[in-house]
Amino acid sequence: MKAPIYSHLTYDIIPNQFNTVDQPDIVILEGLNVLQSGMNYPSSPHNVFVSDFVDFSIYVDAEESLLKKWYINRFLKFRRSAFADPNSYFHHYASLSEQEAIETASNDLGRDQRLKFTPKYSPKPRACQPHFNQRARPRH
């Protein structure tokens, strides 16, 4: 299996560069887009989604305050690492003071990330029910 390599320098996949995994027992995919299914698109039944190829999915819910704290800490980490490279897409953030960086990340949350904290992007109530002591079986 080949997966494209993502660059935090350019914020895009690196052309013609892949990680190759040979017959893994388990593959872990991360991100909300992985949970997207065709059920929300009844007018376009021919769309193919990543979830069509997934045997088992887990949604980890977190309080909004924890998500915001994570986002700000992640922004600060990138500011000290990937953003510091002059070739970085987000290099202009590297020169911010710590306080300016925190304010910028907080403003980003208010403007760009708000959608991620709305019920529209949360799983359906049925999907949120605890599944303890249930057996997971792969689809074949």
Image (spheres, rainbow, N blue to C red):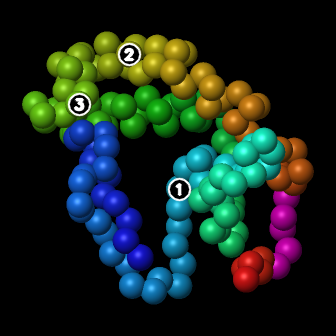
In the image, the segment drawn in magenta is 130-135
Quadrant housing the N terminus: bottom left
Label 1 vs 2, first from the N-terminus? 1
Residue 104 is labelled as 2
In the rendered image, residue 96, in percent from the top left (x then y), is placed at 23, 17
> What is the chief secondary structure element of the magenta stretch?
loop
Amino acid type of the residue tagged 3 in the rendering: Tyr
**58 or 3: nearer the eye?**
3
Q: How many marks?
A: 3
- Binning the other alpha carbons within 10 Å of mark 1 as few (below 14), some (14 to 19) or many (20 upward) gives few
Q: Earlier in the sequence, mark 2 or mark 3?
A: 3
In the shown orientation, is residue 92 left or right of residue 13?
left
Residue 137 painted magenta: no
**Vertical order, 132 against 1 (above or below):** above
Q: State whether residue 134 appears in this view.
A: yes
Q: Amino acid at mark 1?
A: Glu
Q: For residue 134: magenta?
A: yes
Q: Quadrant of residue 116?
A: top right
Please give the label number shown on residue 79.
none
Q: Is residue 68 left or right of residue 134?
A: left
Q: Residue at the location (24% across, 39% down)? A: 10
Q: Could you tell me the amino acid type at mark 2? A: Thr
Q: Nearer the viewer, mark 1 or mark 2?
A: 1
Query: Secondary structure under badge 1?
Result: loop
Reading the image, the residue beneath label 3 is: 89
Q: Is residue 84 left or right of residue 102?
A: left
For mark 1, what is the residue? 30
